[in-house]
Amino acid sequence: MRIDYNIKDKFDFGLFLPALILFGFGLLAIYSSTVNNTFAQENFQRQIVWGIFSFILFFVVYSLPTNVFKSLAIPTYLVSLLLLIAVLAMGKQISGSKSWLVVGSFGFQPSEFAKIATIFAVASYLSRNNSDIDSFKDIIITLAIGFTPVLLILLEPDMGTSIVFVVIILMMFFWKGISSFSLFVVLSPAFVAVAAIFGTIYFVLALLLVIVALISFKKNLFFSASIFAIGLSSGFFTDYVYHALSPHQQRRIQSFLDPNADPLGSGYNTIQAKVAIGSGGLFGKGFLAGNQTQLQFIPEQWTDFAFCVVGEEFGFIGSIIVLSVFLILFLRILKLSHNTKDEFLGLVAIGILSVYLIHFIINLGMVVGILPVIGIPLPFISYGGSSLLVSMFMLGILANLYRTRKNYT
């Protein structure tokens, strides 16, 4: 029997090279934004070290037997819940959120690990049979699996990461195959909750739309009333969560609605980020030549606002290159998800895609001022060991699926 040792047949460069390019842009952005900052100059070296560990982790995960992911689904989920509880009890508070566990000089965010664990757990439950989701019981159990870590993360509180989990659950629901009414049941509470953020009028209008939709679906009165009650409760719960947030998080939401309401406070980063990107022009000001970056107008720009460095110093062309690389990566993952016939693995792949995609959308939305600043890093680019390790871990899972794709297609 002839053995095919063609590396392209076993290793997906369409996944690996985009991540490598994005990591390179991230190093440039981190170096530029920290080179003149006495207190952050070591972050560039730290990111290189984290990068080395991350790429080693990538190849380790890539080499694992593919069936190990399903066997680890429940154990990793339970461990992630324990870590989220532990961080509430003994976590370190940073920027108003108790989301870090620190052991000696090493610190990590359990919520990052919980993303992977939740994807595994939801995929494991949804893939136990091959039918679409029509049972209300299945919806409730899946939501319970997905929203248990969300509730723990909200207690930290970390609104940004909670939103990521919600998107993960919704995209996996959609990929599994959910009826239009079931999708409405899942989405309507979130729709009402978002409307409640904008005020009472929007909240009432959202409830009226829910009533109209329920009438059109022609379900029994008790069931329809239950769905309406859940939507109504979500609106009041949103108000409760808002008042439970720390003052600086409340100001971030207010600044999203009107950045100029507090231009020197919570709206400052958004305004300066738009100035930085807008001043880059077509080709940018050149590496290490961006005024906003080198004069440190944006605090801790190397983290959530690293894309501003790309926009200012590499201009529109550099920004388009980065966006195109992300698009290539997303399309590659989507193709892998579609071609993987094993339902568990396909759901895991789409869950990972949802993590990358929502981080991408929210981070760029923050930078250009169309979304509130909620502390979401840009995958592979923003500074941070936990984020980079998890991003490469998930990429390793995808590369693993590609390596063994002929066994599961």
Image (cartoon, rainbow, N blue to C red):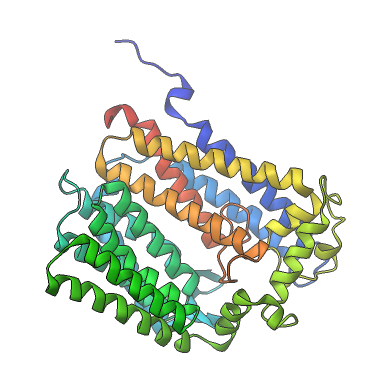
Q: Quadrant of the C terminus?
A: top left
Q: Residue 295, position in %: x, y?
A: 85, 68
Q: Can residue 145 be seen in this view?
A: no
* Quarter of the image where one finds residue 39: bottom right
Say if 357 sits above or below 12 in the image.
below
* Quarter of the image where one finds residue 342: top left
The answer to which of 141 and 386 lies nearer the viewer is: 141
Q: Quadrant of the N terminus?
A: top left
The answer to which of 309 and 186 lies nearer the viewer is: 186
At x 49%, y 85%, the residue is: 245
The answer to which of 320 and 409 lies nearer the viewer is: 320
At x 49%, y 52%, the residue is: 356
Say if 304 sits above or below 234 in the image.
above
At x 84%, y 58%, the residue is: 290
At x 46%, y 30%, the residue is: 11
Q: Residue 90, position in %: x, y?
A: 43, 83
Q: Residue 247, position in %: x, y?
A: 56, 88
Left or right of 37 in this view: 160? left
Say if 168 sits above or below 394 in the image.
below
Q: Can residue 107 be seen in this view?
A: yes
Left or right of 69 in this view: 28? right
Instruction: Report the residue that reaches farthest toward the top.
Output: 1
Q: How many numbered marks, from 0 up?
A: 0
Q: Residue 264, position in %: x, y?
A: 75, 82
